[in-house]
């Protein structure tokens, strides 16, 4: 899961005596084993950041129901254009508005979407009490972003798919994580659950940690930065950036290697994106 979600659970909420178990949600038996009598919420991210695992929302929300817990799905990577978890039984959908919904990397925000009046009122009560309310200008920016969401998502998906196939066949690359590739272990589930496969992908360079660092710092069209989902392409190294908050052993156990590179594929011309990665590979692997 996204490193910041891990951080708020373990470093903020655990201080208030809330308890968390982290399980691989593609393993439904493991999820069942982790459910306890006092479990209140099953939190799922899909596709996951940054390894692009796809989780079965129908099956997982059924498990939460079975144990009398609420289910929440972080839908940040997919956006409502590609995946609508409420239709698959989720109680709460969370979005980082900072990403695709804003779309231009100029606003920070979040939203919880529910289809239940009581839950809506409870969340509104907390929002009012603790002050987690966006400013009118931030709301304006997000609303403006949503107006172009469909066309942006079409282009993000098209570019990411082409780049994923190109990287998959590239000698400099060991492995590509993108649910739109037929080689992705969850490709079939993603095809059923999502309308398209999104603009995020990650890959392992066939090289050392230093060479991977060179790639992310040598690109010109891709900007080296955290965050994602804006019109401009971004590149980053999860182990040292977005997921550095997760302890190294836990990170590596989850398959998050030091050489992993994550890209948020923007809406630029795909040939420029390929050429930019190619020159960075040449620089790093020369
Ligand atoms: C899947 C996911 N959820 C939530 C967030 C948190 O977003 P924000 O920075 O807007 O709080 C991120 C940020 O990268 C993310 O990737």
Image (tube, rainbow, N blue to C red):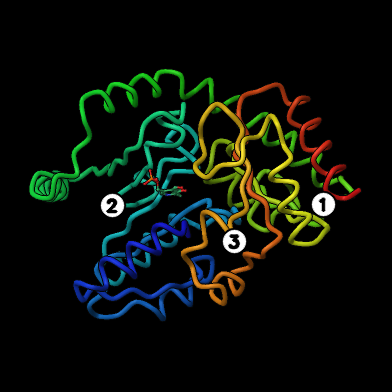
Residue 115 badge: none
Look at the numbered disc 3 and give the secondary structure of its residue.
Answer: loop
Vertical relation: 254 (above or below) 111: below
Q: Using the numbered discs, state the Cα–Cα distance from disc 3 to disc 2 in whole angstroms.
A: 32 Å
Answer with mark 3 or mark 2, whichever residue precedes in sequence.
2
| Rendering quarter of residue 66 | bottom left
* Residue in the picture at 52% in, 62% down: 244
Look at the numbered disc 1 and give the secondary structure of its residue.
Answer: strand
Residue 169: % across, % down: 86, 45
Tell me if label 3 and label 2 are in contact, CB under 8 Å.
no
Residue 253 shown left or right of residue 9 in the figure:
right
| Depth check, front residue: 46 or 101 | 101
Instruction: Give the crowd class for mark 1: few <14, some 14-19, many >=20 residues within 10 Å.
Output: some
* Residue in the picture at 58% in, 48% down: 190
Can you tell which of label 1 and label 2 is closer to the viewer?
1
Look at the numbered disc 2 and give the secondary structure of its residue.
Answer: loop
Tag 1 residue: 173
Tag 2 residue: 91
Disc 3, ligand 1: is the CB inside 8 Å?
Answer: no
| Depth check, front residue: 99 or 276 | 276
Residue 239 badge: 3
| Rendering quarter of residue 62 | bottom left
| Depth check, front residue: 245 or 100 | 245
Residue 133 shown left or right of residue 275 in the figure:
left
Disc 2, ligand 1: is the CB inside 8 Å?
Answer: no
Residue 153: % across, % down: 54, 28
Can you tell which of label 3 and label 2 is closer to the viewer?
3
């Amino acid at each position: 899961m996204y490193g910041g979600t891990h951080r708020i659970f373990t470093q903020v909420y655990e201080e208030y005596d809330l308890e968390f178990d982290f399980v691989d949600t593609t393993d439904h038996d493991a999820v069942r084993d982790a459910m306890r009598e006092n479990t209140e919420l099953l939190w799922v991210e899909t596709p996951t950041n940054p390894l692009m695992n796809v989780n079965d929302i129908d099956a997982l929300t059924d498990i939460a129901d079975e144990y009398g817990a609420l289910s929440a799905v972080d839908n940040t990577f997919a956006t409502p254009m590609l995946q609508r978890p409420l239709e698959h039984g989720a109680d709460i959908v969370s979005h980082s508005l900072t990403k695709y919904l804003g779309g231009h990397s100029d606003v920070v925000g979040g939203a919880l979407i529910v289809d239940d009046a009581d839950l809506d009122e409870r969340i509104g009560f907390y929002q009012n009490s603790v002050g987690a309310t966006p400013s009118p200008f931030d709301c304006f920016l997000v609303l403006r972003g949503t107006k172009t969401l469909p066309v942006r998502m079409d282009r993000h998906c098209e570019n990411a798919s082409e780049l994923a196939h190109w990287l998959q066949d590239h000698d400099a690359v060991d492995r590509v994580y993108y649910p739109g590739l037929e080689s992705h272990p969850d490709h079939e589930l993603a095809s059923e659950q999502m309308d398209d496969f999104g603009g995020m992908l990650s890959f392992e360079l066939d090289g050392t940690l230093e060479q991977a660092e060179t790639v992310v710092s040598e690109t010109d069209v891709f900007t080296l930065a955290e965050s994602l989902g804006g019109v401009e392409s971004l590149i980053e190294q999860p182990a040292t950036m977005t997921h550095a908050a997760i302890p190294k052993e836990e990170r590596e156990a989850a398959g998050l290697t030091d050489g992993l590179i994550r890209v948020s594929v923007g809406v630029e011309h795909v040939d420029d994106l390929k050429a930019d990665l190619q020159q960075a590979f040449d620089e790093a692997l020369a």
